[in-house]
Each structure stands twice: as structure tokens, then as C-alpha cells.
Amino acid sequence: MDFDVIVSGAGLTGSATALALHQKGFRVALIKASDPATSEGRFGHDLRTLALSPVNVNWFKTLDFEDSIFRYPVERMQVWEHDGSGLVTFDAHTVGLTSLASIFEHSPLIEACRTKIQNDVEVFDHTQIVELDSTNKSVQLSKGLSISCKLLCIAEGPNSLTREIAGSAWESQELGHSALVTLARTEHGHRNTAWQKFGDGILAFLPFEGNLVSVIWSLDNARCQQLLSFKDDEFAKLLTETSERVCGKIVEIDERKAFSLKQSLASTFCPKSWVVVIGDAAHTLHPLSGQGVNLGLEDARTLVNYLGNESMGFFNPTSLTRFAHKRRLKARQMLLAMAFFLNAWSWKRPGSRWVRNVGIRAFNRVGFIKHQVMREAVGFGALGSLD
């Protein structure tokens, strides 16, 4: 069986890539190893949420399914430090947008992708790539079938076996931190505002349904395990105090889950002349920025645009190498920026908090710099067009 593009990995990035390429008229195969694990809590919602940039939300609209899915807008964002005097406020309306991001439940968004894929794309289900044949540009599947293509796109996630088979090394840094996630019912609601506080780790509240907020709390591993053992009322009280009551009292807590945090980068995004690596198979970021999934979707959008603009000529090695080099450069810039911010907020030397707060207050006053940072974060800045 012969295809233009084989996409290996049926997560959000892989599924969206397959759908978009199908819309461009390419013959696409999608390899799906397994069904995703669900993480629905007691409130009946997925505990895992995604903050998608306006650019990526607009891209999903072109795939004809996004409007049917509930999403929750982030119109403002406030960032501050415990016991600090500095506060940064971002407002979408100051840069001509209705929102800085949209919060989606992970499972419904993936399910919407998969529903459309079943109708539009040939899916090889519950199988995975076990061998690559560069001479014939074909892949051997674990079920014994061999299929060929002009381009193989690896979007399998950070533990990608195909990336390893293709020869791209994985450079991963353990951060010694975990992300604790849950949903919390608040007394006063969120006012479509995302709140992020630096202190006992990095605590974020993201707007959700009604008075609910999605909680993402980055903590050192030992502290995270300790908080997982708290009773619900103990954790709710701690969350109320730590958040400084920005949404009032935390009145109810959903189940809590945690996952370890790493920053990672593939050694090459083009390990073979006909193979490209994108999304979490290519890079992983600390969730502080909310840019991990957006960077992966930017990989996908850029790849689709390259293919659509250059048609079959894209499949030459020079063009693919150029694409991979530019995307890896962008990912490396993001990783370095995140490492800088994490180190800056972890400084404990005398005077470090004063320096941070002076810098925060100055940044908040310089409108044109803050506006440019916002435009970069939502995907409309100069770096967002680096493709």
C-alpha cells in the first residue's frame, strides 16, 4: 500500500496533521498504537486541560470541528510572586484580541479529531512501526503489514520508538519537579482570568466551566507527593491560602493526579531524508508557559503549509532538512527561554526577590514590550512566523 504521507501517532498533533494533510489532497495514513488513557475526575470532566493559542484555535476551525467543543476563554492573565510587590497583568483586548488562549478538555478534543479521522483518513489501529526501509521508503508494522510513503511524520510523543529507530537521539533533562493537576470549585469564579503565582512552586488557575478552575501546580517531587496525600478539605484549605483567595475560597476539590516534568529535545528533526519528527516526539517543555502543545501544533501547521505550498517538490531532502532545522531552532529557543525563567524564579539569594519585583514592575509599565510578548505568546509575533 502506498501513501503520500504516513503520520505515526494519533495524539492531538498527529491527528490534526493527518486531517489537515487530507484536506490538502494528500493520501494519508495514520498509525495509532493504542487508545488514550482517560483521566476523568469526580466532577465529570477531564482533569487534563490544554491552553491553545488563538492561532491554533483558528487552525482547528479550518478542520471543521472545533466549534462543537466547549472551550473557555482566557481574556486576562495575572502573574505575581508570593510576598512580592510586583504584578504583571496581560489583557487580550490591549492587543486587539478577544482572548489570550482558550482552555479545552483534553479528551473531548482528541475524540473530535478521531471522529473526523474515521471518516477522512485511513487508520491502522492498535499497531506500531517496528522497522524502517529507507531504500523503498516503507515501514513495517507490528501486525506484519508493510506500507510505503513519500514522507513519514513521527508524532508519537516523548517516548517515541519510531524516533529511536530512525536514529534521532533524545536529550532529556529531569527537572526534579512534578505537575499536580485537578479541578477546583471556587467561591467567586475566575472572571475569565488565568492566575499564576510563584512561591511554593508555581501555581496556576485556568478558567473552566462556571466557577471551576483548572489547577496546575508545579512542585518539587517530594512536596508534590506530600500534597497528593492530603485529604480533600486539607488540600482545599492550602489551595485557598496559597492562591491568596484570588477566586475566593476553594469550596470543593476534584481528584488529584501528578506527572513528572522534563525538558527534552530530539537531536535532529529530520533523521532520514524522508522522515520528519514533530510535536512531543521532537520536544517537551515545562508547562509554565503553556506553550508545549502550541509549539507542537505550530510544527504541524508549518509542515502542512510547506507541503501545500511546494506540493510534491517538498519531498526532496533539501527542503525537508530546511524545515526541520528551522523548527528545531524554534524549539531550542523556547527551551532556553524556559530554562532562564525557571532559574530566575528559583533564585534564593538575598536581594533576588527585590530584583525580580523591580523588573516585574518595570516590565508591566512598558506597554510596547509587554504587548509584543503577548503577541509572541498567542502566535502572532515575529517568532511565531519562524517557519
Image (spheres, rainbow, N blue to C red):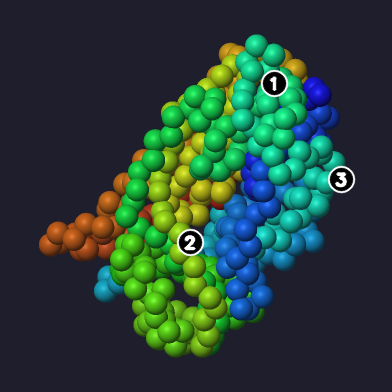
Quadrant hosting residue 83: bottom left
Q: Residue furthest front?
A: 144
Residue 25 % position (x, y): 83, 30
Residue flagged by tag 1: what amino acid is it?
Ser
Give the spatial CA distance, label 1 vs label 3: 24 Å
Whether 332 is drawn above or below 185: the answer is: above
- Which numbered disc, 2 or 3, marks the residue that appears first in the sequence? 2
Q: Is residue 376 left or right of residue 132?
A: left
Q: Nearer the viewer, mark 1 or mark 3?
A: 1
Residue 313: in sight, yes or no?
Answer: yes
Q: Secondary structure at mark 3?
A: helix
Q: Which mark is residue 138?
A: 1
Residue at 39 percent of width and 60 percent of height: 178
Q: Is residue 87 above or below residue 54?
A: below
Would you place residue 55 above or below residue 242 in this image? above
Which residue is the site of mark 3? 119
Q: CA distance from mark 2 to mark 3?
A: 41 Å
Residue at horizontal 68%, vertical 52%? Answer: 35
Ranked by sequence position, the earlier of labels 1 and 3 is 3
Q: Residue at x 69, y 31 (%)?
A: 141
| The quadrant where residue 92 appears | bottom right
State which mark lies toward you, 1 or 2: 1
Q: Residue 215: give x, y in percent of width and height.
A: 49, 70
Would you say 342 lies left or right of 164 here?
A: left
Q: Toward the viewer: 81 or 112?
A: 112
Whether residue 32 is situated above or below residue 358 in the rendered picture: above
1 and 2 marks in contact (CB < 8 Å): no
Residue indicated by mark 2: 90
Q: Earlier in the sequence, mark 1 or mark 2?
A: 2
